[in-house]
Amino acid sequence: MSSPKKTRILFMKYHEAADQQPLSKKAAEKLGIFPSLPLLGLASWVRQNGFHDVHFLDLHAMNLLPAEGRKRVADIKPQLVALTAKTLGWPAVIEIAQMVREVCPEAIIVLGGPHLSLYAEESLSWPCFDLAVVGDGEETFLEICERLEAGHNLLGIDGTVVRMKDGSIVRNGPRALPKDIDRYPMPAWDLVDIPSYHCLTLLRPFATMVTTRGCPWHCGYCSQVYSEKLRFRSPELVVDEMEFLEKEHGVREIVMFDETFTIGKRRMKRFSELVQQRGLKVKFNIRARVDTVDREVLRWLKQAGLRSIHMGVEAGTDRVLKIMNKQITRDQTRKAFRIAREEGIETRGYCMIGYYDATPEDVEETMNFAADIGLDWASFSVATALPGTDLYTISQERGYVSGDFWREYTVNGGGLLPQLETETFTAEQLRAYRTKAYLKFYMRPDLIRRKLSKSEGREELMEMLGGATVLSEIVKSTVMRRIPQVGLGKIATV
């Protein structure tokens, strides 16, 4: 029997990614604090491979101040620290890494996540990082752990970018994507306090899951850059994890964070059958595309416990949908949400304002369409040219953004996020349109009556009150600006 592996590993999460919405901390946190599935998954994977001195710190969920976080890190004395980075949260990742470097100067700090697939070398220009993992992290991170345990150097590991002692940066060869993701265990839920996570519209305690990797679509605004190749977890393992979360942790709702959960009709049928065979009571909500659902699929999922479905509306005109390369139509959107509503499934739609070549008429029609298709919840965002997207490339070509903004943002450790201004809209007008959209949707008497009729319990009432807090923040951020330009004068006085 081999001796236990002694490398002390710390997985660490700071606060959430920065948000385009100018909300107070109180209002933003009503929208939710979620666990980090990538880090919890890696923690479980390395434990399965013999590394048992594993720790997890979620400073946000634990409501720890930076000074308290320093003390926790000092007490653990990690030899290897793993962080994950999204682009909008990049400044916070630098802040936490610098704190770890000050407390444990000899620790190896490894960084992964979506941002590293785009700007790995630029990220490692910050001396607080030692290695970047590009792409799927399990095999690469395990090799890092094994090398460190054996006392070997960390050079030449496929799937990494390394910062050398002299400050130079070396990119190693790519690592092949694993085809079989069933070999990876469920996240290490015992390392976190599940009840500490919360979200405005979810039953508590809740947990999160991912059942697929990759996305075959190429929407012009989406920065999901890992892989177009789809890989699935088996329905059996998915339901095993749901059963574990319900029975061992008392989880009442599970958020399926797949980009599109509903790919594969036979897969949906098998999943729904297994949930019912196990007698699970846990509810779940999913993300889907309107062209991947039909009545049969939604009925199966509803019978299995589907509580809410989230789908992209994005635009209210086929012309703008085509510009976005969304590959759906208004009619498909209307039909999908109508079926969901008829099957008793709560609906949430996501809409985007200010895409290039959109007109004021397109924006108005998007607002009208969102109100007309019977959504329970709607989210409106101003189009943001995220790195790695077609929208970013076109924004550069047309001069909507200057140079490679996100590269400079990475090297500089942040900066004022670009507000997409086109020939048609200023940033101020787009913010005003967003406020108008929220007011127009949520201040409708028919929606208020419908929500009040559903508010039979404390949780539903708290959802409404929390939503009102967030809405008031959005309105306050814009209502004093030049709102009459987009016809908000009357609505703003409601």
Image (cartoon, helix red, strand yellow):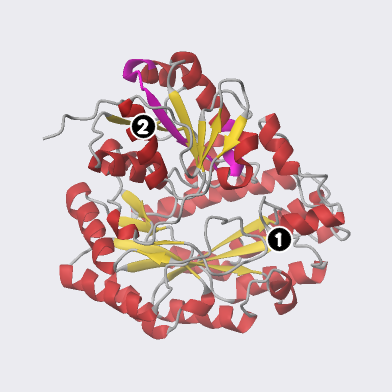
- Quadrant of the drawing holding the C terminus: bottom right
Quarter occupied by residue 89: top right
Q: Which mark is residue 147?
A: 2
Label 2 secondary element: helix
Check disc 1 and report the residue beneath it: 390
Q: At x 75% / y 56%, what residue is drawn?
A: 393
Whether residue 463 is in magenta: the answer is: no
- Residue in front for this viewpoint, 178 or 326: 178
Q: At x 37% / y 39%, what residue is drawn?
A: 143
Residue 452 in the image, given as x and y percentages of width and height? 45, 63
Q: Amino acid at mark 1?
A: Asp
Residue 44 in the image, given as x and y percentages of width and height? 29, 43
Specify few, some or many for label 1: CA neighbours under 10 Å numbering under 14, 14-19, or 20 or more.
some
Q: Is residue 477 left or right of residue 340?
A: right
- Quadrant of the drawing holding the N terminus: top left
* Residues shaded magenta: 74-92
Q: At x 35% / y 40%, what residue is drawn?
A: 142
Whether residue 85 is in magenta: the answer is: yes
The earlier-in-sequence mark between 2 and 1 is 2
Residue 23 in the image, given as x and y percentages of width and height? 61, 41
Say if residue 255 shows up in the picture.
yes
Quarter occupied by residue 304: bottom left
